[in-house]
C-alpha cells in the first residue's frame, strides 16, 4: 500500500493540470445531473402531491344542464365520483383584471373526491335562510354600490366594507387567484344575465389537480354555494354540469369516456379531460428543462468517462517500462490495476463530492426557477435518496471505465521488449510526399505526419476530443433556437401579439375600435370550441381563426394553408392523437353536431400540446350562422410594443376590451440559458482534459523523433513547432468532425423534442456559420496555446534522458 500511495502521489504531481481538469469536469457533470433531477421533480411532483392528497379524479366530464350526469357515477370501473356540480361560466373582475371562471355549486363541505386543498382562507359558510333572503333582496343595491364611481382609495375601501358582510363567498383555484392577484377578503364583481353586477367575496384559495387556468383557453375554477349560484342568474347557454370520476384503473380513461358517451349520448357531452392532460399541463417547461439538462448531463458524463479512459490508456503506454520493472520486482497484475484504479477513482470521488455539495448548498440560493426548483426538491421525500443515487451511479460508470482501461496494465510483460534498432521501412504517405514537393514548412509536414501516423490511435484521439465539441455544438443549436423563437415568435406559431375580447360589445364596435389603432397591422376574428374526437375518447380544441378572404398567417411546417371551405390545419399533437396525416379527412363532434374537415397542412402549434385543429371562421359559421367572433388576434407592427398597444386599447375603450398578450412558451425556458452556459464550461473542461492527454501522448511518442530531429540540425523552435503543429492538426480534425456531427444532431434532437411535445418538427435553427467558425478557431488556438509549454519542456530535455525510450 505504501508503494501504491507513492506511485499515485508521484503521478499526480507530474499531471497536476490534467487531474484538476478531470475533477472540475466531473463536478460540473454532477451539478448538471442533480439540477436535471430537481427540474424533473419541479415539473411533476407538485401536481402529483396535490392529486394524491386531494384523492383526485381521473376523468372530468362536462355535460349539458339537462343531462343525467349522476348516472355516470354508477358505471363499471368507476370507484367513486365527485359531483355532479351545477356549473356556470362567467367573467369575474377585480381591480380591472378580468378572467373567465367556471363557477361550481358545491355544498357546505368540500367534496371527498377531488377535494380542493385549501391554502389560504376557508370554505364558504352556509348562510342562514333569513340572511340568504336579505342578501338576495339587497343584491341590486350592492351591485349599484359596486359599480358606482369612487373618488379614490378611501371610497373604494368604504364600498368594499359595506358589501363584505353581505357578499356571497367564493373559493378560487390557485392559478386563477394568481392571475387576478386575488387574496381572501377581496371583492370580485360578476355581471349576471339581468345586467346587474353582483359581488363575490374571496373566502379562500385552493389547489386542485385539474387543468389550470389559461387566459382565452381554459376558464378558472371557483366554488360557490348553491344559493350564490342561484342569485347570480347567469346566461342559460353558459350553464351545465361537471362530474369527476375516480377509476379503479387509472389507465382506463379512454374506455371510461366511451362508456360515458354511450350512457348519455354525444349530444349531452360538452367536453372531457383526463388526469394525464392535467399532469402534462402542470409539468410545463419544468419537465422540459429537466429532460434537457438530463440529456446534456448524461452526454457530458459519457464524455468525461471517455476522457478518463483515454488518460489512463495514455499513461499506461507512457509507463510501460516502469510497469515492467514493477512486475519484475514482485508487483502482481492485480496490484498494478488497483494502483491506476485507486488514483482515478479518488479523482472521480473528489469531483462527485464537490459537485454534490455545491449543488446542495448553493442550489437553493440560485435566482429564478433554478433556486425555486432546488428548494422544492429538497422538501420532497425523494430527495433523501436521489442526490445519493445520481452521484453514486456517475461514480460507478467512471470507475467501470477506469477498470477496463487499467486492465491493460496487468497484461504488460515483466520483461520489456526492445524496439528494433532499425525500424521496418514504411512507404512515406502520399500526402507527406506531395507536401514536401510543394516546399511547405517542415514543421507543418512533420506535424501532420506525427498527428496521423497511426490510424487507430489518431482516430481514437480525434473521436474522444470530438465528443465534447459535438455536445457544445448541440448546446449552441439549442441556444440559437431559443433566441430566434423568442425574438421571432411567428416561427413558433405565434404570428399575433395580442388577443382582444369585447366585454358586452358587438363585433362591429370591436372592429371599429381596432381600426382606430395605427400600430395594429391586422385583426383576425376567431372563436374556439371543444370538440370530441372520433371514438369519443377525448376532447380537442377546434379553432376558427381568420376568414376565407383574409386567412390567418399560420406557420405551416408541412402541406399548405387552409384557403377553402372545410379545410383545416392541425398541430402535431392532434395528428398523433388521431393517427392521421396531412391529406386525411377527420370527423369531430361539436355539441352533438358532426364536423368533417380536410387536413391540408400541419402547423406549428404551441398551445394545448398541439391538439388543436384550425380552420377559417367561415367554416364554423356554416353550422351556426349566428356565430360571432369570440376574440380577435392582432398582428402588430415590427417596432410596436405589445404592452403599450394593449394599454392604449384598454384605455381607449374605457375598460370594455379585455386585451392580453399572447404568451410565448419559449419564455418559460429563459432560465435555461445560464444552465447552457454552465454546460459549455463543463464540456470545455472535459475537452481540455482530453487535449492534455493527447498532448502528453504526442510528446511521449515523439521522444525518439526528437533525438533524430536534433541530430539532423533542427533548432529548438522548429522542434516545438513540429509538436504544436501535430496537436493543432488533431484539434482541427476533431473540431471539424464535432461541429459537423453536432449541427446534424442538434437539428434532429430539437425537432424530435418538438414532435414529442406536440408542437411539431420544423422549429430547429442551426447555429450561425460565424459561431461555428469561431468555435473551430478557438479549439485550434486553445490546443496550440496549451501545447506550447509541454513542447518547450520536451525540447529542453537532455539527449541522455530519452535513451531509455528505445525499450
Image (cartoon, rainbow, N blue to C red):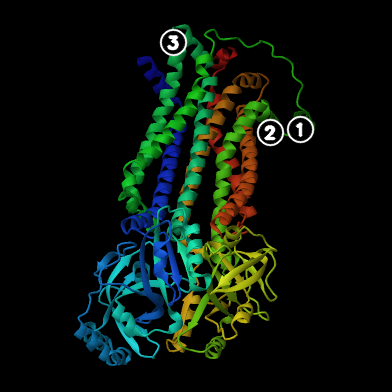
Give the left or right position of residue 81, taking residue 779 as reference: left
Reading the image, the residue beneath label 1 is 435
Residue 595: image tag:
none
Nearer to us: label 3 or label 2: 3
Residue visible at 65% across and 42% down in the picture: 736
Q: Earlier in the sequence, mark 3 or mark 1?
A: 3
Marked residue nearer the N-terminal end (3 or 2): 3
User: In the structure shown, which secondary structural element does the residue marked by tag 1 occupy?
Assistant: helix
Q: CA distance from mark 3 to mark 1?
A: 48 Å
Marks 2,1: beta carbons within 8 A: yes
Please provide percent x and percent y for residue 331. 44, 10
Task: From the top left corner, tell me how far across and down residue 139 is, in percent.
Answer: 28, 89
10 Å neighbourhood of mark 1: few (<14), some, or many (≥20)?
some
Left or right: where does residue 586 sit relative to residue 214? right
Residue under pointer 3: 331
Residue at which label 2 appears: 444
Residue name at image x 31 percent, y 43 percent: 384
**Residue mark closest to the camera, 3 vs 1:** 3
Q: Which residue is more in the foreground, 639 or 266? A: 266
- Residue 590: horizontal and vertical position, in percent? 55, 73
Amino acid at each position: 500500500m505504501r508503494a501504491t500511495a507513492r506511485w499515485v502521489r508521484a503521478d499526480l504531481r507530474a499531471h497536476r493540470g490534467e487531474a484538476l481538469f478531470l475533477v472540475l469536469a466531473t463536478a460540473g457533470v454532477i451539478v448538471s445531473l442533480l439540477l436535471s433531477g430537481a427540474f424533473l421533480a419541479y415539473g411533476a411532483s407538485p401536481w402529483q402531491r396535490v392529486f394524491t392528497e386531494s384523492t383526485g379524479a381521473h376523468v372530468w366530464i362536462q355535460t349539458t344542464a339537462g343531462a343525467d350526469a349522476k348516472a355516470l357515477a354508477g358505471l363499471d370501473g368507476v370507484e367513486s365520483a365527485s359531483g355532479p356540480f351545477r356549473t356556470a361560466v362567467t367573467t369575474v373582475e377585480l381591480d380591472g383584471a378580468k378572467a373567465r371562471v367556471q363557477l361550481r355549486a358545491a355544498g357546505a363541505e368540500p367534496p371527498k373526491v377531488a377535494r380542493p386543498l385549501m391554502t389560504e382562507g376557508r370554505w364558504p359558510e352556509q348562510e342562514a335562510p333569513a340572511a340568504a333572503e336579505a342578501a338576495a333582496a339587497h343584491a341590486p343595491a350592492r351591485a349599484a354600490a359596486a359599480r358606482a364611481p369612487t373618488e379614490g382609495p378611501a371610497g373604494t375601501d368604504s364600498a368594499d366594507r359595506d358589501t363584505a358582510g353581505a357578499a356571497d363567498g367564493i373559493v378560487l383555484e390557485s392559478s386563477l387567484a394568481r392571475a387576478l392577484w386575488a387574496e381572501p377578503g377581496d371583492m370580485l364583481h360578476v355581471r349576471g344575465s339581468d345586467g346587474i353586477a353582483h359581488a363575490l367575496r374571496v373566502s379562500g384559495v385552493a389547489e386542485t389537480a385539474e387543468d389550470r387556468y389559461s387566459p382565452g383557453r381554459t376558464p378558472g375554477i371557483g366554488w360557490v354555494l348553491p344559493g350564490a349560484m342561484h342569485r347570480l342568474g347567469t346566461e342559460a347557454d353558459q350553464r351545465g354540469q361537471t362530474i369527476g370520476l375516480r377509476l379503479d384503473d387509472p389507465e382506463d380513461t379512454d374506455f371510461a369516456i366511451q362508456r360515458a358517451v354511450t350512457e348519455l349520448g354525444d349530444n349531452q357531452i360538452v367536453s372531457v379531460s383526463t388526469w394525464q392532460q392535467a399532469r402534462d399541463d402542470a409539468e410545463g417547461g419544468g419537465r422540459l428543462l429537466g429532460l434537457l439538462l438530463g440529456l446534456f448531463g448524461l452526454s457530458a458524463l459519457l464524455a468525461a468517462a471517455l476522457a478518463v479512459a483515454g488518460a489512463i490508456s495514455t499513461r499506461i503506454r507512457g509507463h510501460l517500462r516502469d510497469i515492467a520493472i514493477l512486475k519484475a520486482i514482485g508487483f502482481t497484475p492485480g496490484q498494478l490495476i488497483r494502483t491506476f484504479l485507486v488514483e482515478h477513482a479518488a479523482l472521480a470521488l473528489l469531483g462527485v463530492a464537490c459537485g454534490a455539495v455545491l449543488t446542495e448548498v448553493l442550489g437553493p440560493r440560485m435566482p429564478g426557477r433554478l433556486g425555486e426548483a432546488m428548494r422544492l426538491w429538497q422538501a420532497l421525500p425523494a430527495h433523501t435518496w436521489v442526490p445519493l443515487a445520481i452521484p453514486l451511479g456517475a461514480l460507478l460508470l467512471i470507475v467501470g471505465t477506469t477498470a477496463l482501461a487499467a486492465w491493460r496494465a496487468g497484461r504488460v510483460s515483466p520483461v520489456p521488449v526492445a524496439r528494433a534498432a532499425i525500424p521496418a521501412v514504411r512507404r512515406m504517405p502520399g500526402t507527406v510526399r506531395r507536401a514536401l514537393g510543394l516546399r511547405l514548412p517542415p514543421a507543418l509536414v512533420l506535424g501532420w505526419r506525427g498527428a496521423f501516423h497511426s490510424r487507430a490511435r489518431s482516430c481514437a484521439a480525434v473521436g474522444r476530443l470530438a465528443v465534447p465539441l459535438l455536445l457544445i455544438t448541440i448546446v449552441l443549436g439549442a441556444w440559437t433556437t431559443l433566441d430566434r423563437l423568442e425574438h421571432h415568435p411567428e416561427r413558433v406559431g405565434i404570428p399575433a401579439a395580442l388577443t382582444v375580447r369585447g366585454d358586452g360589445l358587438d363585433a362591429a364596435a370591436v372592429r371599429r375600435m381596432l381600426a382606430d389603432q395605427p400600430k395594429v397591422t391586422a385583426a383576425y376574428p376567431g372563436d374556439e370550441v371543444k370538440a370530441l374526437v372520433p371514438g369519443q375518447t377525448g376532447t380537442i380544441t377546434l379553432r376558427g381563426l381568420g376568414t376565407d378572404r383574409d386567412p390567418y398567417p399560420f406557420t405551416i411546417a408541412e402541406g399548405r394553408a387552409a384557403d377553402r371551405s372545410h379545410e383545416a390545419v392541425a398541430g402535431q399533437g392532434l395528428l398523433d392523437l388521431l393517427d392521421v396525416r396531412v391529406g386525411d379527412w377527420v370527423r369531430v363532434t361539436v355539441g352533438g353536431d358532426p364536423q368533417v374537415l380536410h387536413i391540408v397542412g400541419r402547423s406549428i402549434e404551441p398551445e394545448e400540446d398541439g391538439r388543436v385543429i384550425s380552420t377559417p371562421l367561415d367554416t364554423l359559421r356554416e353550422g351556426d350562422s349566428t356565430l360571432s367572433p369570440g376574440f380577435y388576434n392582432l398582428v402588430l407592427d415590427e417596432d410596436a410594443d405589445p404592452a403599450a398597444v394593449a394599454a392604449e386599447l384598454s384605455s381607449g375603450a374605457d375598460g370594455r376590451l379585455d386585451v392580453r398578450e399572447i404568451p410565448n412558451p419559449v419564455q418559460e425556458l429563459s432560465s435555461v440559458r445560464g444552465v447552457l452556459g454552465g454546460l459549455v464550461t463543463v464540456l470545455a473542461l472535459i475537452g481540455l482534459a482530453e487535449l492534455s492527454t493527447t498532448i502528453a501522448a504526442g510528446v511521449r511518442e515523439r521522444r525518439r523523433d526528437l533525438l533524430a530531429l536534433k541530430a539532423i540540425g533542427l533548432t529548438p523552435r522548429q522542434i516545438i513547432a513540429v509538436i504544436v503543429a501535430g496537436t493543432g492538426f488533431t484539434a482541427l480534425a476533431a473540431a471539424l468532425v464535432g461541429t459537423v456531427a453536432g449541427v446534424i444532431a442538434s437539428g434532429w434532437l430539437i425537432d424530435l423534442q418538438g414532435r414529442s411535445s406536440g408542437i411539431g418538427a420544423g422549429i430547429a435553427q442551426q447555429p450561425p456559420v460565424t459561431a461555428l467558425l469561431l468555435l473551430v478557431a478557438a479549439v485550434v488556438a486553445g490546443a496550440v496555446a496549451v501545447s506550447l509549454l509541454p513542447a518547450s519542456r520536451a525540447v529542453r530535455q537532455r539527449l541522455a534522458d530519452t535513451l531509455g525510450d528505445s525499450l
